[in-house]
Image (cartoon, helix red, strand yellow):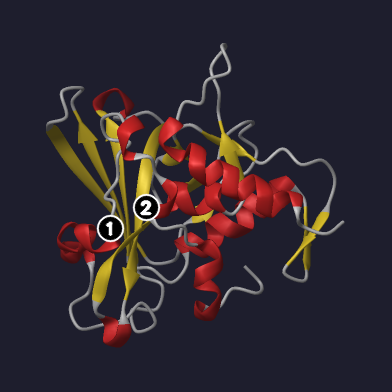
Amino acid sequence: MSFWTAGLASLLVVTGAEAQDRSTCAGIYCPQVRAADSAAELAPYIAAGKTWEQVKGQNTLVVKYYNRDGTLASTRTWLQSAYMQPVAGLPGKVAFAGQGTPTIALHGLVPCTRKGSFSFKGERFTCESFWQDRLSGNLFATQAVLCRAYTDQVDRPIQEATCIRADEGGGGRTVGGIVVDDALVGIGAAALERDAGGKPLRPDLAGAEKTGSAILAGAGR
């Protein structure tokens, strides 16, 4: 995160309307189309009247656990005194964790697969370092990360989920959330996991993957 600034936020964002095919969503893997839709859901975890800069890294991981019929079963929260970080060393996973939290693996996402190193925005990366850098950026400068998982993930050390991070507007006003899954796939840092038949586990992000693949292919050597 050496080069992260608030001014580079646009490099991490793929809006839900651009990235997701709503007709292919299934269950909890259908985050809000518009960022503003998640404002009320995120509001309880935002320090009233304060920006992310003023709370000095304090943030909250929220995981909402759902039954298979789509009803909410329970909610757990973990207060953090520092930003959460990517978790490396889990083959085929794009994951992060914080202080005392489970490891959250973004469902249906794998690291990008470009071989060797490449240049992107003036820095050199491999796919392993690229997804970690972009995920770090999404975990930075936010007061809350809200994830959804099914109840079979409760108490697992590694939990598969889809996540939204709080995104602030001017003056510390929370305008909604950015879907982290979309942001990583849409810039090429992550690709879609596929089943034995070659079908993506997240068909709703197929459009984002196409965009991200083009961006990654255009990155310099």
Residue 16's disc is 2
Inter-mark Cα distance, 1 to 2: 6 Å
Q: What residue is pinned by disc 1?
A: 34
For label 2, count other residues whose C-alpha is less than 10 Å away and answer few (under 14), some (14-19) or many (20+).
many
Say above or below: 209 vs 179: above
Say above or below: 119 vs 157: below
- In x, y percent, where is residue 16? 37, 52
Residue at figure coordinates x 28%, y 58% from the top left: 34
- In x, y percent, where is residue 121? 72, 69
Mark 1 belongs to which amino acid?
Answer: Arg
Choose the circle earlier in sequence order: 1 or 2: 2
Q: Disc 1 on helix, strand or loop?
A: loop
Instruction: Quarter of the image for the C terminus: give it.
Output: bottom right
Q: Are marks 1 and 2 in contact (CB under 8 Å)?
A: yes
Mark 2 belongs to which amino acid?
Answer: Gly
| Residue 184 appearing in the image | yes
